[in-house]
């Protein structure tokens, strides 16, 4: 229970931000999963820039750490390059 109006407002803001971050993080995870489940190199190459942009945005707004973003992008690149 908040003792001040500013604490109530902060709780409301935190909840909105949590839901916003959760939505974009889940959307990005689904996009990464879609690339890793594909066996078509052309389709994977076509969707890579969009997914990389999503990952970069999450790192920029501190939803994920920048090193995690780099590791995700590296893993996706390695997977796509190994596709025949």
Image (spheres, helix red, strand yellow):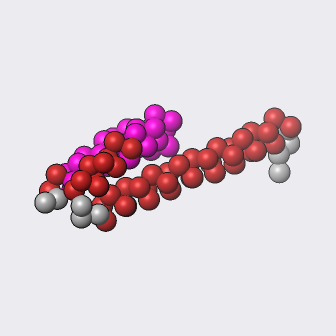
Which residue does the image show at 63% across and 51% down from the upper left? 19
Residue 16 placement, left or right of 43: right
How many labels, in total?
0
Which quadrant would residue 82 be assigned to in this image?
Answer: bottom left
In the picture, the quarter occupied by the C terminus is bottom left
Residue 3 percent across, percent down from the top left? 86, 42
Residue 11 percent across, percent down from the top left? 74, 44
Residue 2 placement, left or right of 16: right
The answer to whether residue 65 is visible is no
Q: Is residue 58 magenta?
A: yes
Q: Is residue 28 magenta?
A: no
Which residue does the image show at 72% across and 41% down from the upper left? 13
Residue 43 percent across, percent down from the top left? 29, 55
Which quadrant would residue 4 be assigned to in this image?
Answer: top right
**Image: 53 above or below 43:** above
Q: Which residues are magenta?
A: 51-80
- State the residue in front, 11 or 28: 28
């Amino acid at each position: 229970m908040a003792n001040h109006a500013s604490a109530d407002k902060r709780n409301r803001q935190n909840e909105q931000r949590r839901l916003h971050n959760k939505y974009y993080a889940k959307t990005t995870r689904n996009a990464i999963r879609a690339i890793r489940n594909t066996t078509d190199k052309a389709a994977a190459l076509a969707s890579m820039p969009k997914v990389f942009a999503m990952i970069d945005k999450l790192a920029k707004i501190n939803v994920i750490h920048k090193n995690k973003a780099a590791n995700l992008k590296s893993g996706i690149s390695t997977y796509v390059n190994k596709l025949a």
